[in-house]
């Protein structure tokens, strides 16, 4: 008899400082679907769910997908949304299965639970205490004891931008299949260091994270351990379990893996100062971009980053670029449904004056929305839908809602009804703009833009724009974090349970 797998996705990176609510409707960008529709939507894509479906297919297993839900980062997930997603998964597991394969994020906070993933796993374990559970997590997961206790196998992305999402699921799946074949007996060990760092300095392609990830990859790739993962954590969450962590999956014995894991975490602690972000004045950054020769010059606004919970309607960087006279530029997407409607009503070729962006206040940051008055001609109107062709989430369908392009004469601004992280050139090319032919490209992103835009960029300038995803941790008011925590307590020493 073929094995029966339950394969599911429940993903959300929660920014507790974001003013954007996260009801079930927020998960509709990919459908919050199940069954054949979910399979058709994700099979063959470079996503964790796509990777797990591939694992199930190659194993010849029968499998069901009771829930495939993924929302853009935003505020805490509504209780009703969490219950709907978790219940669908738990009830399917309760019908009986040989294994569970879960594509989770690892940084979900709900209205009730600080650890959404840990709560889901607790519920599964309550009805299926022995079933093997393989979990693929985002690199920015915030590891907890509940997650490690609930899962059998955990793997995390090795890249940022995340171009190995499907492969992360394959890594977990390979270990799971070996377990089912009784070749191995997986056991996990994990640890954490009290370092909260800006995700702007997390990417494993550069130091200091490159050394840590290199050590983990070497341990897994050499066969010393079954799986090895490092997690940078997600700093835009005011919860008690923040920190840089690592999880190793070992065969039967954990002693060797624990030694390597602690070596990684000790290295992180020794280099903790390198994980700090040092802010710079926005006018200085834009002036630097203006002084550079050639193009495209990418200006990445990491203060209003959709993939970290930003509103995508803060206009500070575009306003400064206009003030300093940048020309031959494209920018966006800016999320402003009202302005999209106004541009559609004017029609292609129509002249409009817009109060663009700035519609959402951010009370947690003490920021009021500030629209920017811009005038120009409507150049293009689209349905905002395109297939990703770049290396991150390849094959995914992006749905930005109705989208329009405003031509100000000096800048082409893409305006959409929905938020969308610009990790693929399609945010511009689908509406007739070739960013490779522009002098300046203004986008809202922290690292994911590098997947699609770094190959065409002659220069990249990071811009400290306003917003609830700012990289300067001093801008956030934390009241629930566990202290001591670096860098808030710079002179702290590790206790026995952390060393």
Image: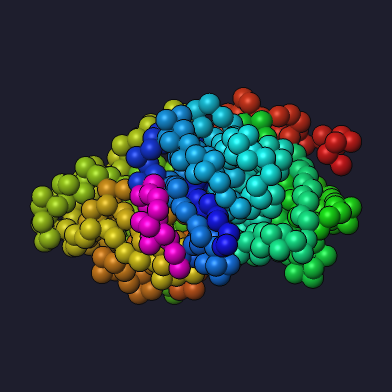
Q: Is residue 171 left or right of residue 258?
A: left
Residue visible at 10% across and 56% down in the picture: 347
Q: Can you tell which quarter of the image residue 107 is in?
A: top right
230 in relation to 44, above or below: above
Image coloring type: rainbow
Does the stretch in magenta take in 36?
A: yes
Q: In the rendered structure, which segment of residues is drawn in magenta?
A: 30-44
429 in relation to 419, above or below: below
| Residue 224 seen in this snapshot | yes
Q: On the rendered image, what quadrant is the C terminus found in?
A: top right
Residue visible at 48% across and 36% down in the picture: 87
326 in relation to 21, above or below: below
Residue 138's spot in the image, x, y percent? 58, 52
Judging depth in this view, the residue of 390 and 490 nearest the camera is 390
Judging depth in this view, the residue of 349 and 461 nearest the camera is 349
Q: Can you tell which quarter of the image residue 370 is in?
A: top left
Judging depth in this view, the residue of 142 and 431 nearest the camera is 142
Residue 222's spot in the image, x, y percent? 79, 70
Residue visible at 67% across and 40% down in the picture: 129
Q: Is residue 112 left or right of residue 486?
A: left
Does the stretch in magenta take in 66?
A: no
């Amino acid at each position: 008899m073929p094995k029966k797998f339950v394969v599911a996705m429940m993903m959300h990176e929660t920014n507790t400082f974001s003013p954007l609510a996260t009801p079930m409707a927020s998960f509709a960008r990919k459908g919050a679907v199940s069954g054949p529709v979910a399979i058709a939507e994700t099979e063959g894509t470079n996503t964790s769910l796509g990777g797990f479906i591939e694992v199930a297919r190659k194993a010849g297993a029968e499998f069901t997908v009771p829930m495939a839900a993924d929302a853009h980062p935003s505020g805490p997930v509504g209780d009703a949304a969490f219950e709907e997603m978790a219940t669908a998964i738990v009830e399917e597991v309760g019908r009986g299965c040989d294994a569970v394969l879960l594509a989770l994020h690892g940084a979900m906070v709900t209205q009730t639970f600080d650890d959404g993933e840990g709560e889901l796993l607790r519920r599964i374990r309550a009805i299926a205490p022995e079933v093997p559970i393989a979990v693929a997590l985002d690199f920015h997961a915030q590891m907890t004891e509940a997650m490690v206790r609930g899962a059998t196998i955990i793997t995390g992305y090795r890249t940022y931008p995340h171009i190995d999402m499907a492969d992360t699921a394959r890594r977990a799946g390979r270990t799971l299949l070996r377990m089912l074949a009784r070749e191995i007996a997986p056991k996990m060990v994990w640890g954490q260091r009290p370092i909260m760092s800006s995700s702007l300095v997390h990417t494993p392609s550069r130091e200091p994270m490159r050394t840590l990830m290199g050590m983990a990859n070497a341990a897994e790739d050499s066969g010393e351990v079954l799986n090895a993962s490092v997690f940078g954590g997600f700093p835009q969450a005011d919860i008690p379990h923040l920190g840089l962590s690592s999880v190793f999956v070992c065969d039967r014995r954990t002693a060797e893996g624990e030694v390597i894991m602690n070596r990684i975490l000790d290295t992180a602690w020794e280099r903790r100062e390198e994980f700090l972000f040092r802010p710079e004045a926005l006018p200085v950054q834009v002036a630097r971009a203006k002084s550079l020769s050639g193009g495209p010059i990418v200006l990445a606004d990491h203060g209003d980053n959709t993939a970290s919970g930003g509103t995508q309607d803060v206009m500070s960087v575009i306003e400064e670029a206009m003030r300093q006279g940048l020309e031959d530029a494209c920018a966006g997407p800016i999320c402003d449904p009202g302005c999209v409607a106004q541009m559609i009503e004017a029609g292609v070729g129509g002249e409009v004056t817009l109060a663009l962006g700035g519609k959402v206040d951010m009370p947690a940051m003490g920021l009021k929305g500030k629209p920017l008055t811009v005038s120009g001609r409507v150049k293009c109107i689209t349905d905002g839908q395109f297939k990703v062709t770049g290396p991150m989430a390849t094959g995914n369908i992006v749905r930005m809602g109705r989208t329009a392009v405003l031509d100000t004469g000096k800048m082409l601004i893409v305006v959409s009804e929905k938020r969308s992280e610009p990790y693929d050139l399609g945010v511009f090319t689908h509406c007739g703009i070739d960013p490779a032919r522009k002098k300046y490209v203004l986008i809202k992103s922290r690292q994911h833009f590098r997947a699609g835009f770094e190959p065409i960029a002659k220069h990249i300038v990071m811009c400290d724009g306003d917003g609830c995803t700012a990289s300067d941790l001093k801008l956030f008011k934390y009241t629930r974090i566990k202290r001591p925590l670096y860098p808030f307590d710079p002179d702290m020493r590790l206790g026995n349970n952390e060393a």
